[in-house]
């Protein structure tokens, strides 16, 4: 164990687009204070950079998601090893996943919403946050539980080349849906059709999304899985089939804009079309995670899902790596490992 605890703090509330000046690096002695009952101390090994973390940096006021206090380490999903425990459920050496913070050592109360969960043997730290982590679990439950797709229906996915979106596309294909993805750039669209095996892709940077949806979905969209919001959500609403379902997963088009996302402008279309629009949180389905991981693992082993990870190595990389999410510069699940060799360990 190191005697140093490195931290990245939230120095300022981001005003619009994220800046490196919004973060501050600090070092302090590694914590050694006694743990309260139920607490565990974790040495973080890999951090997930997830778009929703940008919301957590906003001022307090939205009761549905937390707000990182200024001057505190940035909150983030992470995996690591237990180095001290005052909880009978966890032993020193256990590998765990939790909602942690950007620091080497985090103390987590195992009785709150950030309660850690143990990683099964045979799955690396990287895979626990990557191919079997928050993003694919979000895709799994958002599509299958909220979207309730039926074989033969048409599924459209925004942010389709991202970590969550590409998994949604491929689960849809596995379940017998006709899948159309929306992504930015010809290379991402080609990857979706060639590697992920979906039926069609729309390049929102160079095509009229609403017009292309009308061409590709002449009978309307049965399930729209939205990671983006804004104009793309509006285009999908205008092309929904009767009794269609809109799964609200994210609004990344507005996260880094410093303003609240706009909703659809023609809500009467939802009423007259008997269209359901529903948001969700992956954590709502925590009790079902083992089932989802088992399915995802089986699909990966059978070669039915392709997966990309964008792994950055070095604690110093955290803020800069996180910012690439909002430029669309990452290629796959965006992770930052403190040490790559340990990050690949499966025990």
Image (cartoon, rainbow, N blue to C red):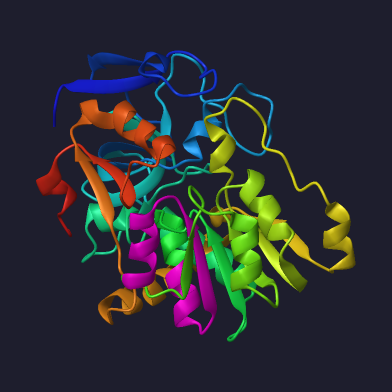
Q: Position of residue 308 (x, y in %)?
A: 28, 58
Residue 240 covered by magenta stretch: no
Residue lying furthest left: 341
Which residue sits at x=70%, y=78%?
219
Whether residue 48 is visible, yes or no, is: yes
Which residue sits at x=71%, y=64%?
239
Quarter that holds the N terminus? top left
Q: Position of residue 243 (x, y in %)?
A: 78, 73
Q: Position of residue 147 (x, y in %)?
A: 64, 69
Residue 172 covered by magenta stretch: yes
Which residue sits at x=76%, y=48%?
264
> To which quarter of the image does residue 109 belong?
top left
Q: Is residue 15 left or right of residue 147?
A: left
Q: Is residue 211 left or right of residue 243?
A: left
Which residue sits at x=30%, y=63%?
307
Closest to the observer, 269 or 90: 269
Closest to the observer, 129 or 182: 182
Quarter that holds the C terminus? bottom left
Q: Which residues are magenta?
A: 169-194
Q: Position of residue 97 (x, y in %)?
A: 35, 49
> To which quarter of the image does residue 260 belong?
top right
Q: Is residue 341 left or right of residue 81?
A: left
71 up-or-down from 250: above or below: above
Q: Is residue 291 left or right of residue 131?
A: right
Closest to the observer, 304 or 102: 304
Please give the count of numbered marks on the rendered protein.
0
Whether residue 248 is visible, yes or no, is: no
């Amino acid at each position: 164990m190191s005697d140093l605890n490195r931290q990245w703090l939230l120095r300022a509330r981001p005003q619009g687009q994220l800046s490196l000046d919004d973060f501050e690096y600090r070092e302090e002695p590694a914590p050694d204070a006694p743990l309260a009952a139920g607490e565990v101390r974790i040495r973080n090994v890999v951090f997930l950079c997830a778009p929703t973390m940008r919301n957590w940096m906003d001022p307090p006021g939205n009761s549905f998601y937390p707000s990182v206090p200024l001057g505190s380490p940035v909150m983030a999903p992470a995996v690591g090893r237990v180095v001290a425990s005052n909880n009978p459920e966890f032993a020193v050496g256990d590998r765990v996943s939790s909602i942690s913070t950007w620091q080497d050592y985090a103390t987590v109360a195992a009785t709150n919403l950030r309660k850690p969960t143990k990683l099964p043997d045979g799955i690396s730290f990287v895979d626990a946050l990557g191919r079997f982590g928050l993003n694919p679990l979000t895709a799994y439950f958002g599509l299958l539980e909220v979207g309730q797709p039926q074989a033969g229906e048409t599924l459209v996915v925004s942010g389709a080349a991202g970590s969550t979106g590409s998994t949604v596309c491929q689960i849809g294909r596995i379940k017998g849906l006709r899948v159309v993805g929306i992504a930015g750039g010809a290379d991402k669209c080609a990857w979706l059709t060639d590697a992920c095996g979906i039926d069609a892709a729309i390049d929102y940077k160079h095509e009229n999304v609403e017009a292309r949806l009308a061409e590709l979905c002449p009978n309307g969209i049965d399930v729209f899985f939205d990671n983006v919001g804004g104009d793309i959500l509006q285009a999908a609403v205008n092309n929904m089939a009767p009794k269609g379902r809109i799964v609200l997963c994210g609004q990344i088009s507005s996260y880094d804009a410093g303003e609240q996302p706009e909703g659809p402008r023609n809500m009467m279309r939802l009423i007259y079309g008997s269209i359901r629009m529903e948001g969700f949180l992956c954590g709502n389905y925590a009790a079902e995670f083992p089932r989802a991981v088992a399915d995802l693992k089986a699909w990966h082993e059978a070669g039915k899902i392709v997966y990309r990870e964008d792994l950055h190595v070095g604690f110093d990389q955290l803020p800069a790596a996180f910012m690439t999410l909002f430029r669309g510069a990452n290629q796959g699940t965006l992770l930052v490992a403190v040490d790559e060799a340990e990050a690949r360990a499966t025990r």
